[in-house]
Image (tube, rainbow, N blue to C red):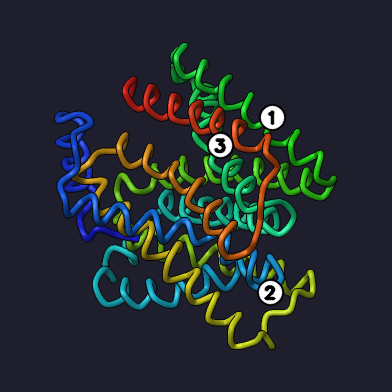
């Protein structure tokens, strides 16, 4: 989850990319971005295909990532880790708790509704981020509100299509939307701490907190944490290595050169990517009405991201 640069260097890289605007990516950056998108697109299908309790998937995903990141931090950034002040520690704990809530709502949603719907609805986090910004006193432009209206229309149409399938699918849709809200709050908390803390140190602490919270939830809820088939352990490893570590790490890498707008807009391609993989590997065919609904949702989200970041 890191590009190896300090917060100050990453900030400088972000300004450089912003100054150049939305430029065509270099061939290497395009390849890296494609690999990252492929990695994160496997998240929903892998979760749906893993015969492991949803909360246990959430726990192991974060525990395995922590097992990689914590030793790396102890070897390369021990002083930074030990030097975190009280505010940074509080923010890291808050971000970890919010990430636990995100996984505890979104991962079960994938088992209740289609991968396409769960992935599309959890992607509403830019909308929640805009609403959180407004609640914090920041100005939200009319174009962003227009994008929110378009995206919400698509979300309502999508949930209406899933309601025609089953009430269980509608519950999954609701959990995905809530998961998107928690993801937005997690990003807000994370953006604050990453002003002074490197991404590697931050994610190591955050994922560890998330794993510990989910471990308690699994124990209290009597979720089975062991005894899985070898195939399911391999899927958990693939989920951790792909979506949790590889995908987001590469997004961080190209963020410095492509800028936030290009990367954020490209991440929306996870929606059709996950839907395609679910159709090919799981045989999931969303209702016909889900296609125009997803188009509306993605269009609205693109408007929110593009206009919101331009205004920023």
Residue count near mark 1 (Cα–Cα under 10 Å), binned few <14, some 14–19, many ≥20: many
Disc nearer the start of the sequence (3/2): 2
Disc nearer the start of the sequence (1/3): 3
**Is residue 197 something that shows in the picture?**
yes
For this rendering, which residue is in front, 77 or 99?
99
Question: Where 31 falls versus 233 (above or below)?
Answer: above
User: Disc 3, disc 2: CB below 8 Å?
Assistant: no
In space, the residues marked 3 and 2 are separated at their CA atoms by 26 Å
User: Disc 1, disc 3: CB below 8 Å?
Assistant: no
Q: Secondary structure at mark 2?
A: loop
Task: Place residue 152 in its image quadrant.
Answer: top right
Residue at mark 1: 157
Disc nearer the start of the sequence (1/2): 2
Residue 192 horizontal/vertical position (percent): 39, 42
Residue 16 horizontal/vertical position (percent): 14, 36
Q: Secondary structure at mark 3?
A: loop
Residue count near mark 3 (Cα–Cα under 10 Å), binned few <14, some 14–19, many ≥20: many
- Label drawn at residue 52: 2
Residue 21 horizontal/vertical position (percent): 20, 29
Residue count near mark 2 (Cα–Cα under 10 Å), binned few <14, some 14–19, many ≥20: many
**Is residue 205 something that shows in the picture?**
no
Question: Where 311 falls versus 26 (above or below)?
Answer: above
User: Disc 1, disc 2: CB below 8 Å?
Assistant: no
Residue 205 horizontal/vertical position (percent): 44, 64
Residue at mark 3: 124
């Amino acid at each position: 989850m890191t590009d190896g640069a300090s917060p100050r260097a990453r900030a400088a890289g972000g300004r450089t990319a912003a100054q150049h605007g939305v430029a065509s990516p270099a061939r290497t950056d395009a390849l890296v971005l494609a690999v990252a998108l492929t990695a994160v697109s496997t998240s929903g299908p892998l979760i749906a295909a893993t015969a492991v309790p949803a909360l246990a998937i959430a726990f192991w995903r974060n525990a395995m990532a922590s097992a990689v990141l914590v030793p790396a931090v102890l070897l390369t950034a021990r002083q930074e880790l030990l030097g975190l002040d009280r505010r940074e520690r509080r923010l890291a704990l808050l971000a970890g708790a919010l990430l636990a809530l995100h996984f505890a709502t979104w991962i079960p949603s994938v088992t209740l509704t289609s991968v396409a719907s769960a992935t599309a609805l959890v992607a509403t986090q830019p909308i929640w981020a805009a609403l959180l910004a407004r609640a914090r006193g920041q100005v939200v432009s009319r174009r962003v509100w227009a994008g929110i209206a378009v995206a919400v229309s698509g979300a309502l149409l999508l949930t209406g299509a899933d309601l025609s399938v089953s009430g269980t699918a509608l519950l999954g849709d609701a959990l995905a939307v809530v998961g998107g809200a928690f993801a937005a709050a997690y990003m807000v908390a994370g953006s604050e701490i990453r002003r002074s803390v490197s991404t590697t140190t931050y994610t190591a602490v955050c994922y560890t907190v998330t794993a510990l919270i989910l471990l308690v939830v699994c124990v209290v809820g009597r979720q089975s944490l062991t005894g899985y088939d070898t195939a399911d352990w391999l899927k958990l490893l693939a989920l951790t290595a792909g979506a949790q570590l590889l995908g987001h790490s590469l997004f961080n890498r190209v963020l410095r050169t492509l800028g936030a707008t290009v990367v954020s807009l490209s991440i929306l391609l996870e929606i059709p990517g996950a839907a395609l993989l679910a159709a090919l590997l799981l045989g999931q065919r969303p209702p016909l009405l889900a296609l125009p609904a997803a188009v509306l949702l993605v269009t609205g989200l693109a408007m929110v991201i593009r206009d919101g970041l331009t205004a920023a």
